[in-house]
Amino acid sequence: MSLEVRVTLVALVGVVVLFFGLGSILPQQWVVETSAHVPAEPPRVLSLLSDFGSWQKWSTLANTGRGNESVAVEGAPGTVGHQLAWRAADKEAVLRLARVDAGGIEYDFLSRLGAGEALTPLGHGRVRVEPAAGGAVVHWTDSAQVTGFAQRWFAWFGAQQESAKQSQQASLAKLATVLEGK
């Protein structure tokens, strides 16, 4: 075997060991939090947070439907189980209220990638509302579990977190605008 072939094989083995070795110690979860002041009292803010139908007015998440998808708001607003669902063929993604109280909401993000499969939890979110001078402060936290070595590497580089942070910031800015009545 020539020297070049041996060097190439050693390099390939090294890359594979590096990928799986470092991938096994990378974090398996990411968390993003954004806060913003909004010009309304907490009960008014909570009424918009706990109704996914109103999310279409202010949230970037509710307006992500594609041409081949249906987007539906299901269940009674403000109750556990109320959800925003995206469906296309045999795929489904769901944002479902998991908790609602005077301090805010919590939701789960679930997904199904094939017919007959159960919805799989992919992430969790929490939006807390605290009284503040001139309105309220909204704290939005999203977290997600990552599986597999490739997803850990993507999470480590921060693309998913940056996308979530931008979505939160844009949504909270639009929420403030909606609450101002503009």
Image (cartoon, rainbow, N blue to C red):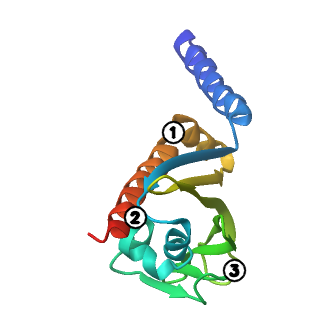
Quadrant containing the N terminus in the rendered view: top right
Q: Which of the 4 image quarters holds residue 43?
A: bottom right
Residue beneath label 3, please?
80
Residue 65 visible (yes or no): no
Look at the numbered disc 1 and give the secondary structure of its residue: loop
Residue beneath label 1, please?
158
Seen in the image, is 178 located left or right of residue 108?
left
In this view, 28 is above or below 5 = below
In this view, 177 is above or below 15 = below
Location of residue 60 in the rendering, given as x and y in whole percent from the top left corner: 39, 64
Location of residue 155 in the rendering, given as x and y in whole percent from the top left corner: 57, 42
Residue at image point 41% right, 60% down: 39
Residue at image point 63% right, 18% down: 10
Seen in the image, is 98 located left or right of residue 129?
right
Residue beneath label 2, please?
175
Q: Which of the 4 image quarters holds residue 182?
A: bottom left
**Residue 148 vs residue 29, the one in the foreground:** 29
Location of residue 135 in the rendering, given as x and y in whole percent from the top left corner: 46, 59
Q: Residues within 10 Å of mark 1 (few under 14, many from 20)?
A: few
Residue at image point 69% right, 78% down: 117
